[in-house]
Image (spheres, helix red, strand yellow):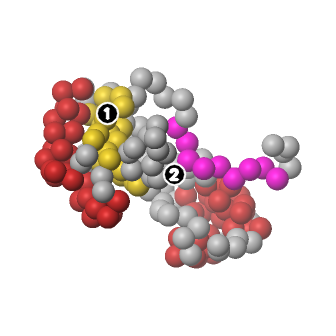
Amino acid sequence: MSRIDPIDRRLIEATQGGLPLVPRPWEVLAGELGLEPAEVLRRVRSLHSRGVIRRVAAVPNHYALGYRANAMTVWDLPDERVAEVGERLGALEFVSHCYQRPRRLPEWRYNLFVMVHGRDRQETERQIGQLKELIGGDARAFDVLYSSRILKKTGLRLADPGRPE
């Protein structure tokens, strides 16, 4: 596990809710943290290269863009095929999440999770059809779980060390 120093922690805490929406966010962060902008960028690059942060990216609100049908498809694939199939499905432009999870037998047999978004259910059904085609005979079973409401829409947050859990 890669360690972070107190300045890295402050930088992560300052950005975990998103970057400032200004032309030069690194300068704003530098001012807040008492650092030079070049030092902020150096630290972000270091955190990324060490795997502490995965990426810095814009995350659009798909609901605001008109994507109202959200379907988590779950698949029961042979364990030796999950990585290859997951790579192929995860590369599709309409797939936002694709990951492997352990089975929880006997209640939950699925080991590959693939999230798709469409403007309506018909669109997601077409996308799911494409997933089925690509998976072919590898799927022993699958199911579709449609979102009905949003309960949480944030990433991991570092706990405030001064606040009791």
Q: Which mark is residue 22?
A: 2
| Residue 96 located left or right of residue 57 | left
Q: Residue furthest front?
A: 106
Measured as percent of width and height from the top left, residue 39 is found at 63, 75
Task: Check disc 1 and report the residue beneath it.
Answer: 144
Q: Looking at the figure, which quarter contains the N terminus? A: bottom right
Q: Nearer the viewer, residue 72 or 156?
A: 72
Quarter residue 57 falls in: bottom left
User: Residue at point 65% right, 74% down?
Assistant: 2
Q: Regarding mark 2 in the picture, which secondary structure is present there?
A: loop
| Residue 7 located left or right of residue 98 | right
Q: Residue furthest top?
A: 148
User: Residue at point 27% right, 41% down?
Assistant: 141
Quarter residue 100 falls in: bottom left
Q: Can you see residue 89?
A: yes
| Residue 13 located left or right of residue 99 | right
Measured as percent of width and height from the top left, residue 19 is found at 55, 53
